[in-house]
Amino acid sequence: MMAAPRILPQDQLRGKGVYLLDDHEVIRRGLRYLLESAGLSVVGESGSAREAARRIPALRPDLVILDDELQDGSGADVCRAVAAADPGIRCVLMTGEAEEAVLIDSILAGAWGCLSKWDDSTEQLRLIGRALAGHTAYSDRFRAPVAGESTDPATARSDAGLRRLTSQERNAALGLARGLSNRQISQEMFLAEKTVKNMMSSVLMKLGMAHRSQVAVLVSKSVAGHSGADYRSGWFPDLIAEVAAALVSCTTESGFLPPTAADRAAGVTRLSVALAAARTGMPFFSSKQPRS
């Protein structure tokens, strides 16, 4: 995320209407005070995702601030519902955890940004001002996740092990996850069975595992691809760089003019395609790769 011209709250906030969704009344009260002190009008609030999804399109606020985790749903799901009902309403998520999974979910849901509950009021207002002006509005606390810096030692060790696997070792491990024996894997890969056995020993060593079943479980979870940042644990690490580039493109603060609707749509598509490629190894075309 690169530095950009500061968008001052007093230039963008006064007179705008905001809807608040958070299932903690204390947080809503604090946000209401912060926003009203900056000249904003809180046109509605709720602690329920279902209620908010119903009320927001009718109220048509300029901006919606959504808690990312709610008792009856998620902020990302409400953001999708609002975008489908009225694309002109801008949403930003608010989270207590600056995790890459939250960042990715916010982008794919069509949010304009993601605030951190741990940022001070000045930074929160700056980001709200950016969103109201049509710019991306992501807290600086997401800088480390975008750069791929893991805060989980176990995840970091797993990622390092995956990157040490050769392409043949990766294919052998994929065969193991499908329930194939060494002989069956050797027949598929046109290798000697002894070569596959040695390859499996190398895979176990690199991943720090003692049993083939552990490898099979890890590979199955990686290839299945759930949500968020699981692509980093996938078996196609060479494609991770494209996901990182797509994230930077979607969250950067560079540029004086707001992105167009086409720019935003292209960014979401690029991220979606890059995630699918990193999780499955299927070919993809990024926005910077011309089709042949």
Image (cartoon, rainbow, N blue to C red):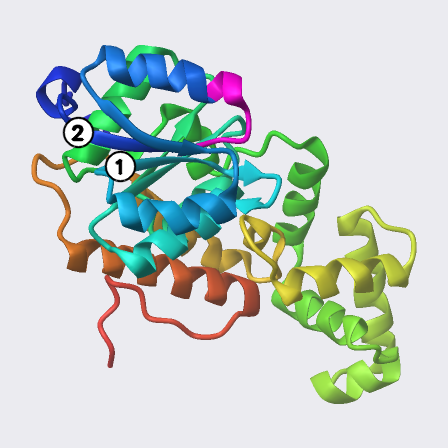
Crowding at dot 1, Cα within 10 Å, few <14 / some 14-19 / many 20+, comes out as many
Q: Amino acid at mark 1?
A: Leu
The image shows residue 30, relative to residue 105, as above or below, that is: above
Residue 109 visible to the viewer: no
Quarter of the rendering containing residue 183: bottom right
Residue 105's x, y, as percent? 46, 49
Please check the rendered image and state whether residue 23 is part of the magenta-colored stretch, yes or no: yes
Of the 4 image quadrants, the one containing the C terminus is: bottom left
The image shows residue 140, relative to residue 176, as above or below, that is: above
Of the 4 image quadrants, the one containing the N terminus is: top left
Residue 46's x, y, as percent? 45, 34
Relative to the observer, which residue lies in front, 144 or 87?
87
Secondary structure beneath label 1: strand
Mark sitting earlier along the chain (2/1): 2
Residue 203 visible to the viewer: yes
Q: Which residue is mark 1?
A: 63
CB under 8 Å between discs 2 and 1: yes
Q: Which residues are magenta?
A: 21-27
Relative to the observer, which residue lies in front, 274 or 240?
274
- 56 with respect to 174 (left or right): left
Q: Residue at x 87, y 76 (%)?
A: 194
Q: Which residue is mark 2?
A: 16
Q: Amino acid at mark 2?
A: Lys
Residue 42's x, y, as percent? 29, 26
Crowding at dot 2, Cα within 10 Å, few <14 / some 14-19 / many 20+, comes out as some
- 232 with respect to 39 (left or right): right
Q: Residue at x 70, y 45 (%)?
A: 158
- 116 with respect to 213 (left or right): left
Alpha-carbon span between mark 2 and mark 1:
8 Å
Q: Residue at x 54, y 31 (%)?
A: 23
Quarter of the rendering containing residue 39: top left
